[in-house]
Amino acid sequence: MAAVKGITRIRVPAGVAKPAPALGQALGPLGVNMMEFCKDFNAKTATFKNSAVMRVKLTAFEDRTFKYIIMAPANTWYLKRVTGISKMASNPGKETVGTVSLKALYEIAKSKQAFDPFHKGLELEGIVKNLAGSARSMGLKLVR
């Protein structure tokens, strides 16, 4: 395997990646073939909703090859979808913009654990606690 040229983290909409300027600015300097990345990424994320913004960690090598890891969308994306809110609280802790059930947090945690390689080894309870913290910081109230 060739030497590593660079590592970048990008956010790309699932199933609809295009060689657009935003993606080009991240991948161009690393010498990554954007069309090849887009085709492969779109094939791997075709089952997700187009609104899902996937987090990607891409490693580019000197011989112009690359590998990447697709991670689940951010907690805020899941929580906004479940609760139907459009924006978070401007003053969390004092202002509440909605509620989220513990059952919904467990469903999100199962989804993240199944797809995200960084969550596979974690306990479900730990992922739920992380989601609960994100929910509180967004101004969501937890209900049973």
Image (spheres, rainbow, N blue to C red):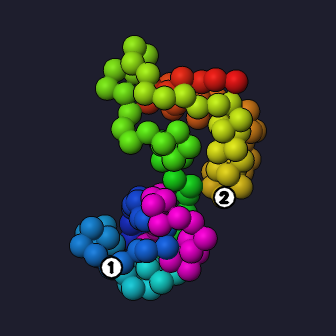
Pinpoint residue 64: horizontal percent, then vertical percent.
41, 83
Q: Nearer the viewer, residue 131 or 96?
A: 96
Q: CA distance from mark 1 to mark 2?
A: 25 Å
Q: Please state the extent of the stretch shown in magenta in the rendering.
A: 42-60
Q: Is residue 56 above or below residue 65?
A: above
At horizontal 55% and vertical 57% (from top left) the residue drawn is: 71
Q: Taking the image as drawn, is residue 67 in sight?
A: no
Q: Taking the image as drawn, is residue 22 in sight?
A: yes
Pinpoint residue 51: horizontal percent, then vertical percent.
45, 61
First along the sequence among labels 1 and 2 = 1
| Image quadrant containing the N terminus | bottom right
* Amino acid at the residue labelled 2: Phe
Pinpoint residue 54: horizontal percent, then vertical percent.
49, 60
Q: Is residue 102 left or right of residue 80?
A: right
Pinpoint residue 127: horizontal percent, then vertical percent.
66, 37
Q: Are marks 1 and 2 in contact (CB under 8 Å)?
A: no
Q: Is residue 85 above or below residue 24?
A: above
Q: Secondary structure at mark 2?
A: helix
Residue 115, by quadrant, is: bottom right
At horizontal 32% and vertical 70% (from top left) the residue drawn is: 23
Q: Secondary structure at mark 1?
A: loop
Q: Nearer the viewer, residue 123 or 105?
A: 105
At horizontal 39% and vertical 71% (from top left) the residue drawn is: 5
At horizontal 52% and vertical 81% (from top left) the residue drawn is: 40
Q: Is residue 86 left or right of residue 14?
A: left
Give the residue pinned by disc 1.
Answer: 19
Q: Nearer the viewer, residue 61 or 91?
A: 91
Q: Is residue 56 in the magenta section?
A: yes
Q: Is residue 112 in the magenta section?
A: no
